[in-house]
Amino acid sequence: MLGKHSIFLIGPMGSGKTAVAKYLARLLDYPFHDSDQEIERRSGADIPLIFEREGEAGFRRREREVVAELTARPRIVLATGGGAILDEDNRRDLASRGWVVYLETSIEQQAERAGRTRHRPLLHGADPQARLQELMRAREPLYREIADLCMSTDQRRVRSVAERIASEYRAWLRRPATSANG
């Protein structure tokens, strides 16, 4: 269990990571962090502008630095960007430093939620459903690879998902050290 006293939420865009993480942080009385918000705060630019100026590679470099720093903090709840798991160092840091929850959601739910904002540069200029399917094919195995818990958010309220995660996390913490994953 050493080093696993933080909770890191992973999953595709539109899965509810930020909303669930905020609620979960309040339930556990842990600080809340969002890697995308931290990147924007540090750079003074929003993510679409970073993508425009530096490309996806520039954004991912910034993301790697932020994830490395935030995952080293004790007892936090972290919402990651949907593509954070693409980087091997991020996957290692997430898996070794915290309890990882994969928020699963359908392509339809993602399209509905992500379509409400223009803050999704990977969807610009593409058929959103086709692009979301393409992203999911590449990313889902990586989400599952490091997840300690998988939970669907389709048709579920933020409160319900956060309460279930908190319950599962508390049960996980109570396990004898020999049977815990970490």
Image (cartoon, rainbow, N blue to C red):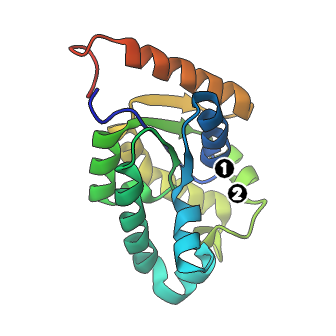
Query: Residue 97, relative to residue 68: is it above or below?
Result: above
Residue 47 lies, in percent from the top left, at 59, 73
The Cα–Cα distance between marks 2 and 1, rounded to whole angstroms, is 6 Å
Q: Which residue is mark 2?
A: 114
The quadrant of the image that shows the C terminus is: top left
Q: Which mark is residue 110?
A: 1
Name the residue at the bottom extreme: 53
Q: Residue at x 43, y 57 (%)?
A: 84
How many residues crowd around disc 1 within 10 Å: few (fewer than 14), some, or many (20 or more)? Answer: many
Left or right: residue 120 versus residue 83 is right
| Numbered label tally | 2
How many residues crowd around disc 2 within 10 Å: few (fewer than 14), some, or many (20 or more)? Answer: many
Residue 109 lies, in percent from the top left, at 70, 44
Query: Residue 167, relative to residue 135: is it above or below?
Result: above
Q: Is residue 3 visible?
A: yes
Q: Residue at x 66, y 63 (%)?
A: 128
Left or right: residue 111 versus residue 71 is right
Q: Is residue 156 visible?
A: no
Q: Residue at x 73, y 70 (%)?
A: 118
